[in-house]
Image (spheres, rainbow, N blue to C red):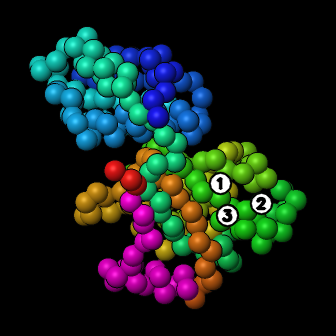
Amino acid sequence: MSDGTLAAARYLPLGDAALAVEFGDSIDPATNARVIALAEALRRAPVAGVTETVPTFRSLLVHYDPLRRSHDEMVGALRERVAGLRVAVGQGRRVTIPACYEGALAPDLAEVAALTGMTADEVVQVHAATEYQVYMLGFLPGFPYMGVLPERLRLPRLSTPRVRVPPRSLAIATAMTAIYPLESPGGWWLIGTVPVELFDITADPPALLRAGDRVRFRAVDRPTFDALRSAWLAGEGRLDVTEAPA
């Protein structure tokens, strides 16, 4: 549907070859849906001079060739696209990712359960029962920021971040859930691990998920996780993905 509030978008210059189209001040599915809608519109019908777009929580970063179009000309072209934009929340791909919430693969699960007043099984059930929207990729290549985490699971970040978070760790913090694609420092609570790679530089595209995807997690036991991991490493792994409507 068309959303009249899109006319209030802000066009912010970022150097001489980029600008941000900002749709609001809050991080929420509706604002992010506007970002994704513009990115998809530009993908399907490119604006001359645009070289790359990068979705964020509440704005779309647009890189362009200043030798082809000035800032004012680019803003004018983007205003036309925004004015006719059709926005619908929850229209991205549906992706189901297996996750193991057991033992060493879920080092913070017991503490998360204690802090939230639930059992470990309840934490898993609540987390896996929710569909999450991928707001954006950032921090690490392929790192998906996903929301909205149910209120019952919301905790502040760790007071002391870990120096090393294992790759493929499934994590929660504040109102979001995420997966660490690579080993890195991190301050989120680790409640599980997925058997699939989130980023592969040799793949096309290299990131498994993309902004706008809708993600659910399917809880699996450790033997199933190990079998899925082996299949993925052998190049035989598959995800349950339903493409977005055209």
Which residue is label 2 attached to?
112
Q: In which image quadrant can residue 112 be found?
A: bottom right
Tell me if label 1 and label 2 are in contact, CB under 8 Å: yes
Q: CA distance from mark 1 to mark 2?
A: 9 Å
Precedes in sequence: disc 1 or disc 2? 2
Tell me the residue at 26%/29% (across/down). Answer: 63
- Judge whether residue 59 is colored magenta: no
The amino acid type, in three-letter code, at marker 2 is Val
The amino acid type, in three-letter code, at marker 3 is Ala
Which residue is label 3 attached to?
129
Magenta segment boundaries in residue numbering: 224-243
The amino acid type, in three-letter code, at marker 1 is Ile
Does dot 2 land on a helix, a strand or a loop?
helix
15 sits to left or right of 177 = left
Residue 65 percent coordinates (x, y): 17, 25
Precedes in sequence: disc 3 or disc 1? 3
Tell me the residue at 28%/35% (across/down). Answer: 42
Question: Dot 2 surroundings within 10 Å: few (below 14), some, or many (20 or more)?
Answer: many
- Judge whether residue 225 is colored magenta: yes
Does dot 1 land on a helix, a strand or a loop?
strand
